[in-house]
Image (cartoon, rainbow, N blue to C red):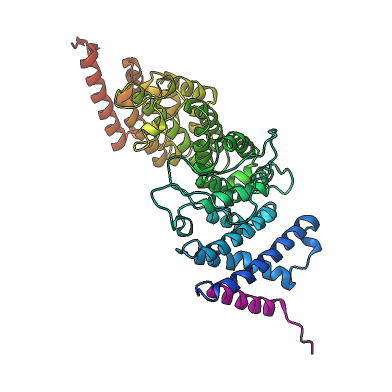
């Protein structure tokens, strides 16, 4: 009988050994030796990552102890190790220096493994780049934290950009406290080519990554944005935006369907904030808001109901944000930015506003993209229509609602099911008070005269009552003739 261990037996033994090292980190006496052993495990994982990149997984034995050890270290041990370090107040300088060197080793692992699309790698970087972790905040006081060269020579190397002088990726911010250790870790990550590796992941044409994986890296950059130097931001952020938006634009219908809407919202929002750090709000707004409209339309015309819902929600959100922006621009209670537009920082405690979009642009965009026809056409869905009242209300408020819109809206529910009728009636009920022209109200009124008695329901009578009330109020306000009598 062979005494050779099975892969499962190796897994059990290795996991037990790693768990002991994890536990030892909480003991002040055992922690240094445990950390030294874990450094060796991390080095082994780095070597495996290099082999995977160079040879491919098919050429390697995924049942070997080296493979099992690296995978368990990544999936199980790193979260526990970071819990025992990042979340603890470690005050001993020797211990802090040892942990710092271990974090450097993890960053080396992140850079090597990044192209392998392992979610745990993304999680690791996001955890390390969390400036509120107790390990980083320990020792911070009212004064700025000076940089300390904990890890030996930490001079950042030139990354792939046209400048000749080496670039420092992060530095002590002027107006806030910051951890010198975290700043040096960011610089170390940059010197390893970590930021360029992010861009390369987006740019891969074969073995494409997924956006949920890249969300970790965009979030990591966003988390430490206030520690990044302006020269680096000015170099890196436009490239990140271009690569990210190009990646999303190139997503297939299947990829788009499988991507959670929260991921799409998050990465665009974070890049929007980063762009706002290096350019005027209206310039950043033009880039992001046009992209948001394009993405919203792509989702809205997709085959996935969830994505259609997301696209419609994004469109109505942009409409409402633009209206708030235009109202705020006319109000002295708001601090305005370039061009008289309200700056986001002035309204951050309020609902969001746009920086660049205008009502005129949106009206043209809705018309050019036949959005009403798409909403009410062959792919009519009552759950989408009943959420579209902001669009019709916007058209009515801007006097852009037409007879054709009313005809299409009314015709979409004529002789149809109760759910469809209810969705359309809800639109009319919301929009009628905002109609600018009395002739359009009369056009709606004429639709009721065309109805057969069998089509009239209680909801029909309710809507008719709402319409006549709106018409009466409009006639009294404007002085128009109703039933042969001039009302003034």
Question: Residue placed at 52% from the left, 51% from the top?
Answer: 180
Question: Residue placed at 50% from the left, 47% from the top?
Answer: 223
**Residue 485, x across and y down, in percent:** 19, 10
Instruction: Look at the image and tell me whether residue 305 can be seen.
Output: no
Image quarter of the C terminus: top left
Nearest the eye: 19 or 290: 19
**To which quarter of the image does residue 358 belong?**
top left
Nearest the eye: 107 or 7: 107
Residue 145 lies within the magenta run:
no
**Residue 434, x across and y down, in percent:** 32, 24
Image quarter of the N terminus: bottom right
The secondary structure making up most of the magenta span is helix
Q: Is residue 101 above or below residue 141?
A: below
Where does the magenta region start and end? 1-24
Residue that sits furthest to the bottom in the current view: 1
**Residue 191, x across and y down, in percent:** 66, 47
The answer to whether residue 404 is left or right of residue 182 is left
Q: Is residue 192 above or below residue 283?
A: below
Nearest the eye: 280 or 405: 280
Count of marks, rendered view: 0
Q: Is residue 228 above or below residue 353?
A: below
Nearest the eye: 288 or 360: 288
The answer to whether residue 439 is left or right of residue 199 is left
The answer to whether residue 330 is left or right of residue 204 is left
Instruction: Look at the image and tell me whether residue 318 can be seen.
Output: yes
């Amino acid at each position: 009988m062979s005494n050779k261990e099975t892969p499962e037996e190796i897994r059990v033994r290795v996991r037990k050994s790693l768990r002991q090292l994890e536990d030892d980190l909480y003991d002040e006496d055992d922690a240094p030796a445990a950390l030294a052993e874990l450094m060796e495990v991390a080095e082994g994982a780095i070597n495996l990552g290099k082999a995977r990149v160079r040879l491919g997984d098919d050429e390697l034995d995924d049942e070997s102890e080296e493979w099992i050890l690296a995978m368990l270290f990544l999936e199980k041990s790193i979260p526990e190790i970071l819990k025992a370090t990042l979340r603890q107040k470690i005050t001993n300088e020797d211990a802090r220096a040892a942990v710092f060197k271990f974090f450097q080793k993890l960053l080396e692992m992140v850079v090597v493994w990044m192209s392998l699309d392992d979610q745990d790698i993304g999680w690791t970087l996001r955890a390390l780049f969390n400036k509120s972790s107790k390990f980083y905040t320990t020792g911070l006081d009212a004064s700025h934290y000076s940089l300390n060269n904990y890890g030996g020579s930490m001079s950042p190397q030139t990354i792939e950009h046209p400048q000749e002088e080496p670039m420092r990726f992060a530095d002590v911010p002027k107006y806030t406290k910051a951890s010198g250790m975290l700043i040096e870790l960011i610089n170390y990550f940059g010197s390893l080519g970590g930021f360029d590796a992010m861009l390369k992941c987006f740019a891969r044409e074969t073995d494409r990554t997924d956006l949920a994986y890249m969300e970790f890296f965009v979030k990591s950059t966003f988390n430490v944005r206030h520690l990044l130097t302006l020269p680096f931001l000015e170099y890196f952020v436009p490239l990140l935006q271009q690569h990210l938006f190009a990646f999303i634009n190139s997503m297939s219908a299947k990829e788009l369907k499988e991507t959670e809407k929260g991921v799409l919202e998050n990465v665009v929002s974070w890049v929007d904030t980063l762009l706002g750090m290096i350019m005027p709000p209206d310039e950043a707004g033009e880039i992001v808001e046009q992209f948001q409209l394009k993405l919203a339309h792509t989702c809205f015309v997709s085959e996935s109901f969830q994505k259609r819902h997301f696209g419609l929600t994004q469109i109505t959100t942009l409409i409402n944000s633009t209206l708030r922006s235009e109202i705020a621009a006319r109000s002295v209670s708001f601090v305005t930015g370039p061009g008289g537009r309200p700056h986001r920082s002035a309204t951050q405690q309020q609902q969001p506003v746009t920086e660049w979009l205008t009502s005129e642009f949106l009206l043209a965009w809705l018309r050019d993209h036949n959005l009403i026809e798409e909403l009410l056409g062959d792919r009519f869905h009552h759950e989408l229509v009943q959420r579209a009242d902001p669009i019709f209300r916007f058209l009515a408020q801007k006097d852009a609602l037409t007879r054709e819109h009313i005809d299409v809206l009314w015709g979409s529910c004529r002789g149809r099911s109760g759910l469809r009728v209810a969705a359309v009636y809800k639109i009319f009920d919301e929009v009628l008070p905002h109609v600018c022209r009395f002739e359009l109200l009369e056009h709606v009124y004429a639709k009721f005269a065309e109805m057969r008695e069998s089509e009239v329901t209680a909801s029909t009578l309710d809507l008719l009552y709402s319409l006549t009330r709106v018409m009466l109020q409009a006639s009294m306000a404007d002085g128009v003739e109703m039933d042969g009598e001039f009302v003034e």
